[in-house]
Image (tube, grey):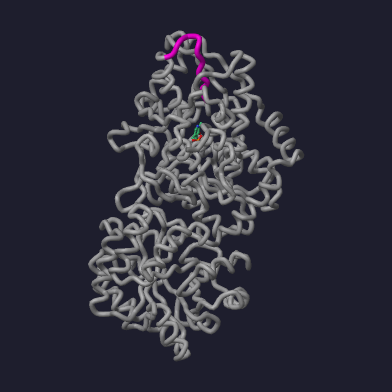
Amino acid sequence: MTKFSDLTRMPDARGHFGAYGGRFVSETLSFALEELEETYMALRDDPDFQAEFDHDLAHYVGRPSPLYHAERWSRELGGAQIWLKREDLNHTGAHKVNNTIGQALLAKKSGKPRVIAETGAGQHGVATATVAARLGLECAIYMGAEDVERQKLNVYRMQLLGATVIPVESGSRTLKDAMNEALRDWVTNVDNTFYIIGTVAGPHPYPMLVRDFNAVAGREAREQSLKQIGRLPDALIACVGGGSNALGLFYPFVEDEDVAMYGVEAGGDGVETGRHAAPLTGNAPRGVLHGNRTYLMSDEGGQVSDTHSISAGLDYPGVGPEHALWKDVGRVNYVAANDKEVLEAFRELTHVEGIMPALESAHALAYAKVLAPTMRPDQHIVINLSGRGDKDILTVAKLDGIEI
Amino acid sequence: MNRIDQRFATLKAQGRTALIPYLTAGDPAPQYTVGFMHALVEAGADIIELGVPFSDPMADGPVIQKACERALKHGTRLAHLFAMVREFREQDTDTPVVLMGYLNPIERMGYEAFADQAQAAGVDGVLTVDMPPEEADEFGPVLKARGLQSIFLVAPTTSDARAGTISAHGEGYLYYVSLKGVTGAATLNVDEIDAHLAPLRKLSDLPLCVGFGIRDGATAAAVGKVAEGVIVGSVLVGQIAACVDDPAAIAPRLKDILGEMRQALDA
Ligand SMILES: Cc1ncc(COP(=O)(O)O)c(C=O)c1O
């Protein structure tokens, strides 16, 4: 049996999180991944590197982000106190920038003049285009053609920042296909290109380093809880696409056994309908995609399934390998919220607190509506409000029948 | 002796270079594949790499991506591939067949079940593009126990240390990827390939076969001068794409192209 304290020592030297993770890539990329691992391991505990990272987070991103007590919404839900970790207030509007700041520093050390990324909702693409602009790097962003359509505002933002956005027409035309295409680009241009992966997936060492860069949110939230609540919270909630904002919040709490954790996947039309993007909640079989072994939605023949979610950022058939392990050992409860519940939560927070969440983050809020009423008013829930909802206004307007 | 080793021993004795065509199984539809395999052998194929279609072929360019889509539209899966190889073996018991693809379909079937059925069907080797030797400690022995050979890739970016590891795990032949890129990419530099193969020869006794970028008789012959085998895929698959509406025209075209390469290699 894995002890929770063991979870802080993952992955092992070969990038495995128990049975998950690893480095399943074609040979051409092995060298680049070994090089990245070496660079990162050398810098990970280097005080100068940490200082540079912290400096950028403070002065460019605007950290620490507040821990906000949503008093009115808590009263309305009639149970636990709700606290929002305001990652939506970061520069560029989501948690994604924590990771791109970190990887941009690695890119700079590598001396490569070009960066690429995959993006779903466009938040990671925007965050990558932003750091590329700041460092004067050439930048190409791969985005599924369907996502280009539903996240138009972010596409234009990336272009304004100087990035080239490449719509991907293959497969299901969403995030997984964008990642395939980014990997093809990387194989071709590996000598001059640094691949900034946007979530805790991909081949080792990405799941580890993306987690480490995002964990700043959890460290802050832990400290802020002690100061503002006077103790640790009773529960944490975060949405899970690849799982970077969730791991970022959860990781610094992993040994705090009394803190319950809930990862909320995209239920789409409902997990029972099969039209969803919830590999953990839906108990998908074990599989290998994009460099790691994890829970992966696929058919009997091992072909990767099409997924369905109102939120482009969660519309992915796999999940970061560390989440797969955390599910198996029971450290996190994985649940799903369907599109309808998510839209309700989106509107509710906007009306009651004047905070418009990203549709991704609204998955976490939807589950808070289920959990909070089962708890007492002297109990506390911290939710990762991973991004702001401006990018989703067109999607919501369309559902309301409004043309903008 | 495994058919692959046997084939390379024969070729060596004859002083000839192996010609290894690749096709995606089930493209343009499953009923054509076995006929194409026989046609390739008639045109001079020494080994056949049979592609397992996959929804997310990350190492492949557009030509083989589309082949996968065509094959999957007809529901081609591993069970069909085994049936194809079994049928092929009814007439051809000599030509080695290597299954080439991505790990997930195998992972989903289960390593043991896969290996049992592959062996029973008459498969000789397995090349899993996204499974480097470091991740193969479980799968490798399962294959070996059934006499199936594990074929691995070596790339221009592979360090000597890694090449040593790969060679130690590899069987049959080493598949040298001639360029940084996906399948179907265009340019290929024979001097560069030669420069990379030289150190590999010191590290490995396995035959070195070169794939990616072989387009015609001339490129095949040029690469054939520095390698034990040439592997050709996208050019053949491109012919299938061009004739999806006239499948009867495919086999003759495959034979023309491969035949030209055979002649150029043997000249
Ligand atoms: C605001 C926001 N939250 C969450 C996600 C999902 O990613 P992850 O699960 O890696 O946090 C995204 C991805 O685009 C996002 O934009």
Q: In this view, does A71 lie to the left or right of B122?
A: right
Q: Residue at x 55, y 61 (%)?
A: A28
Residue A377: in magenta span:
yes
**Rendered-image quadrant of the C terminus of chain A:** top left
Residue A369: in magenta span:
no
Q: In this view, does B233 lie to the left or right of B34?
A: right
Give how far across and how far down residue A40 sits, in percent: 66, 47
Q: Residue at x 28, y 65 (%)?
A: B82
Q: Residue at x 59, y 40 (%)?
A: A9
Give how far across and how far down residue A226 sits, in percent: 62, 17
Question: Which residue is at the front of the view, A176 or B201?
Answer: B201
Kindly indicate the quadrant of the structure image that contains residue B157. bottom right
Q: Is residue A81 left or right of residue A41?
A: left
Q: What stretch is highlighted in magenta?
A: A375-384
Question: Which residue is at the front of the view, B70 or A400?
Answer: B70
Question: Which residue is at the front of the view, A225 or A254?
Answer: A254
